[in-house]
Image (spheres, rainbow, N blue to C red):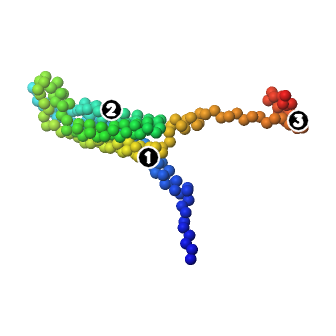
Amino acid sequence: MEYVTAVPHPRSEAAGPARAGRLSLALALLSGALGAAVALLATRQRWSQGTATVAGGDFPLTAKGSDVTGVPASLAIVGLAALVAVFAVRRAGRVLVAGLLALSGAGTIAASLFGASDSSALDEKAAQATGDTAATVDTLTHTAWPYAAAAGGILILLAGLLALRYGRGWPAMSGRYERAGAPRPRRKAPTADPDRPEDIWKALDRGEDPTGA
């Protein structure tokens, strides 16, 4: 009895990597853009609140994420720019930009978590409110927005890791535009057949010599 060994079709073998490339590209774009938007939004929200004791009683104080630290917002912008730049470069340049994207996400996470327990911004506001440089804020509480900024950093980091792993197979923006903008070769008009009067008239309309001289 003869056994027939099934040979995989080349198209089916190539479909797997191609599908993984498209999926990773879509996921990287979504996570990177969403992560940057979440981080930027979170830094504009209230991260901490407390009170300062003044002559008239307790004075409420609040601090936004941008008051606490400007690092998460700056790194989110850098990550967003790196996400766009990934498609404008190739080979080693793409690896470097993907690494920058991943580092932007990691830095956003670290800065956000560090700012979640920081009280220096409110202490500075307490000193301004009381006129005492040694004054500190009382009844300090924090919100969940720093952790939302850290979550945005996780998404940016994920986009960077996907770019490092699958970015070599992603399309390049410059190559696509070069192909689209390349001049097309002009088609040479057919030579008029002297035995066909209609060809002679068409050549004359085009301003050509129908005799080919």
CB under 8 Å between discs 1 and 2: no
Q: What's the mark number on residue 166?
A: 1
- SS at mark 3? loop
Q: CA distance from mark 1 to mark 3?
A: 61 Å
Residue marked by disc 3: 194
Inspect the image, locate mark 3, and give the three-letter code of the amino acid beneath it. Answer: Pro
Dot in front, 1 or 2: 1
Q: Is residue 199 above or below residue 55?
A: below
Name the residue located 24 percent from the left edge and 32 percent from the top edge: 68
Q: Residues within 10 Å of mark 2 (few under 14, many from 20)?
A: some
- Which of pointers 1 and 2 lies earlier in the amino acid sequence? 2
Q: Quadrant of the N terminus?
A: bottom right
Asked whether the viewer can see residue 116, the reply is yes
Q: Quadrant of residue 64?
A: top left
Q: Does residue 35 appear anywhere in the picture?
A: no
The amino acid beneath tag 2 is: Ser
Residue situated in front as seen by the camera: 200 or 62: 200
Labels 2, 3: front one = 3
Q: CA distance from mark 2 to mark 3?
A: 73 Å
Q: Earlier in the sequence, mark 1 or mark 3?
A: 1
Which one is earlier in the sequence, the residue at label 2 or at label 3?
Answer: 2
**The label number, if any, that marks residue 30 in the structure image:** none
Q: Tell me where residue 83 appears, x and y as whole percent.
A: 41, 38
Residue 166 is left or right of residue 145, and the answer is right
Would you name the residue on which mark 2 appears?
A: 74
In the displayed structure, does residue 65 sit left or right of residue 124? right
